[in-house]
Structure formats: C-alpha cells, structure tokens
Image (tube, grey):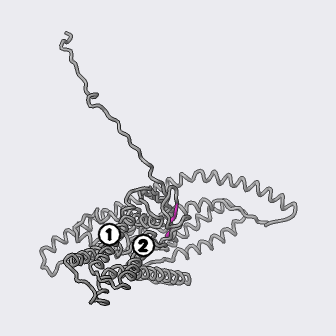
Amino acid sequence: MDTESTYSGYSYYSGRSRGSHRHGERSRDRHKSRGKDSRSEKSVTITTPPAEPLLGDSAVRGEQVQDDNWGETTTAVTGTSEHSLSQEDIVRITKDLEDSVGLDCRRYFTLALAVVLGLLVFLTPIAFLVLPHLLWPEKLQSCGTACEGLFISVAFKLLILLLAVWALFFRQPRAGLPRVLVFRALLAVLVLLFVVAYWLFYGVRILDSQDENYQGIVQYAVSLVDALLFIHYLAIVLLELRQLQPCFSVCVTRSTDGEMRHYNLGQLSIQRAALAILERYYCDFPVHNPALLSASKSRAAKHLAGLKVYNVDGPGNNAAAAAAAGMAHSQSRAMIAAAARRRDTSHNELYYEEAEHERRVRKRKARLVVAVEEAFTHIKRMQEEEQKKAPGDVMDPREAAQAIFPSMARALQKYLRTTKQQHCHSMESIQQHLAFCITNNMTPKAFLECYLTPGPTLQYSRDHWLARRWTLISEASVTSGLKDGSTFLLRCGDFSLVVTTKRIPYIQMSEEYIDPKSHKFVLRLQSETSV
C-alpha cells in the first residue's frame, strides 16, 4: 500500500516537472507533501460487518484503486468493525425516522377509515332488519315463507360481499404512494353517500311511521345489499380491469450507466405507473454498482487536470499588466491547442486500459473456477466418506460450507475486487449461498453464476433495498393519467430513473383475399427427347 502510494506520487511529480522548470523546487516540495498525504489517506480502510447489507454503500463511492494482490496481505471481509456517527448522520437518521413515523401514521389512519366504512356497510342491512323487532315488535306483521327466504338471500349476499371486499381492498400494501388513489377515494365517497341516503330514507319512511309491513323492510335491506354488490363490481372494473389493456409504451433509463428497459402499461396515473415500473425495476435491471463508474470518472479527471494555467502577477490596472495579459492570452491559446491534441490520443489509453482489465478479469475468473471446482470435488469426496460413518458423525451443509470456504476465499476475493463487486457480497452471504448449493446438490457452475454475472437487485441483500425510499418528480400532477410524451423521474440516492411515455399507435388491419385456384399450375413434360 505504501509502495504503491510512493510510486504514484513520484509519477505525478515527474509529469509536472516536465511542464514547469521554473518552479521545480517548490513543486518537488509540494508533491512530496502530497505524497505523504496520499500515503496517509490510502492507509485508512473503512470496513463494514459481513452480516450487514452492503449494496450501495457510501464507502464504495470514495474507494481508491488499490493493488490487485490485496488478498495476499489484507482480509477483505472481517468479523468486527468500528462505527462512528457524525452530526450529519444523526440528522439524516432523525429525518428518516420522522418520515417513517409520518408514513406509518398515514397508513394506519387510512386503514382505520377503511375499517370504519366497512363496518358501517355490513352492519347497516342487519340494523335494518333488527331495529323493527326492538322498537315496535307488537305492530309487525308475521313474516311468511317468502320473507324467510329473503333472510337466507341477505345472509349469503353479505357473506359473498365480505369475501369480495376482503380480496380486493384488504391486501398487503405494496408501497406508500405520495397522493391518494383517485378511484379508491371516489368509490369510498360513493359508498358513504349511498349508505347515508339509505339511512335517511329508512329513518323518514320506516322509523318515523313505524311501518308494520316487515316483508317490505326485508326487501328494502335486500335492495341495499344488491346495490353494494354492484358497487363492488364497479370497483373491480375501475381498479383492476381498466389497466389491463396496454395503451402506453414507457422507456426507463438509469441515469448513471444508461441501462434501459421498455414496458407496456395501461390506463394508469403517474404515481401508479411509477409503482409498476419500480416493481419491475427490482426484477429486470441489474444491480446499481457505483464502483464501476469510478474508473471513467478518474480517467476524465486525469485528462482535465492535464492543463493548468496560473496567473503569477495577479490582476493589474496598468499598461504593462495589460500587455502581459495579452501575451498570457496568446500563450494560453497555444497551451489549450496542445492539450486538445493530447486529448485526441486518449482513445488509445482507453483501449489499452480496457484490454488490460479484460485480461485480468479472465485470469481471475479462470483461477476462481478452478478453485471452486476443486472445492466441490472435495465435497463429493467428503460425502462419500460420510456415508460410511455413523449418523451422528455426519457433517451438516453449514459446517461443510465453512470447511471448504477458505480454499476458495482468496480467489473469490480477488475476482470480486477486480470486477468491483466486493461491496455486493459479504462473507456471511457467500457461506449461506455455498451451504444452499451443497444442500441442493448444485454444480460449481451454479454456485458461481451469481458472482460471474451481475443479477437483479432482488438477488442481493433484502435489508437494504427493502428500506429504500424513492422520490417521484413530475411536472404534471401525480394523480393525473399518463399521456403521450409525458416524462417523470424516480430518484433514489445518487441515481435516478428517467421515464418517457409514448402512446401505442392505433393499428388498422385490412384483409386481402387470395383465390386458392390462382396458385394451381400445370407442368407439361415433353414425351419425346432428342437423341
């Protein structure tokens, strides 16, 4: 680590000394001090406990390039770590707690309103049938066979309505949306007005007059239950069936690496479309790895730092200063032109850097594959030996994974380091995956697939992406429907998803009839042949 830091500091100084001979001694002293600072900075290592979710860790964004042989002298995954909290971290944690409490209160308040409205709906028909027996039982007419049959009808319809409402409305919420769902609010208001209207009619025409026709009261309750069933059918059409037919094609682009997917959506509001996109994002998009962007950023910073212009004399107001400024201007133009010619050759550097990186990745991959195959071969040999032992001496998959993991740990650490995936996998998760593969008798290729090919976000640690918060940014109201050309953003941390909408065009098809007889032809062969 110190050797590498010293070498990088020396190369930086030599490149600067060619550009400026007049300030050689000062630059040498300055770069020596910078080399010391770089050595002190590179000696600091930030680690996290292996059981923690490591996706999108902020420590990776500030990661510096280290030696490829770090696995020989450094342990990448440790069992202990030290944590420190700054004032900014405390403020951020406090804000997150306040936001989570607000979301929980809103969710529970909505659930409480739904429960109260549901109890009002289901208890109203029963109250219509019970109140006459409690208030004027001696005036009621006897209920005949048809009236008793209506009791059975009301009971089964209420049971069907209860199951239908439970299946449609009382489901586990998938996300917390910023605004209220318009159709749900309209349906709730419609049901409330409907029940209130029935109560008003019941109070004026039945309670005040103490109606003696009990069969008519039962039919009145049956009509209420029928109307509620029709409202529930309307809810199914508006909330479920209306969005099934695709109407829009949305293009989702990740802002950092340009990863792109296309989806077809129906008639949805912007916030519901954002929810549908996020549900597919976690399954279709590869995991966001900010460490892969560090190489391009460092390369761009190196080229931008290739030219520096210093004003030694500072701003002046006399003629000599103006003449010096004109000369400096002409010199700066020449230097900018030279720097532009230098940047024209940067594609060669990029080509050789990518070729060298691919070579190193193939080399690490080959070593990793060989190490894993040898470890699985050792597992099979151990299984054959354990079949001859007593049942109490058999090793469970967890112990077997811990026994063979050190043989492949070094190669796996180096490969993950080279491919910038070391923050995505902890030692605990690797051992759990290895035990899972041993339990299900999987091959070495199946074990390595999740490390050789970056998978979707859901493949990695659940504790991290489950608590992620997304911010919906849209010029139009999030409760308005999708339109052709509408654009909105979904921001999360240091990246965002840019969503553009296009309407699926109207397709008009025509039919062209082809007569089957038009395909028939006669092949005539000449019987005589030339001699």
- The mark lying in front, picked from 2 and 1, is 2
State the CA–CA distance, disc 2 to disc 1.
64 Å
- Note whether residue 68 is visible: no
Q: Which residues are magenta?
A: 487-492
Q: Which residue is mark 2?
A: 190
Disc 2 marks a residue whose amino acid type is Leu
Query: For residue 454, what is the image quadrant?
Result: bottom left
Query: For residue 416, what is the image quadrant?
Result: bottom left
Q: What residue is shown at x 30% (from left), y 86% (from top)? A: 132
- Note whether residue 243 is visible: yes
Q: Nearer the viewer, residue 215 or 478?
A: 215
Q: Which residue is mark 1?
A: 408
The mark nearer the N terminus, 2 or 1, is 2
Residue 381: percent from the left, percent from the top? 19, 69
Above or below 498: residue 431:
below
Q: Nearer the viewer, residue 183 or 323?
A: 183
Residue 309: percent from the left, percent from the top? 71, 61
Left or right of 479: which side holds 158?
left
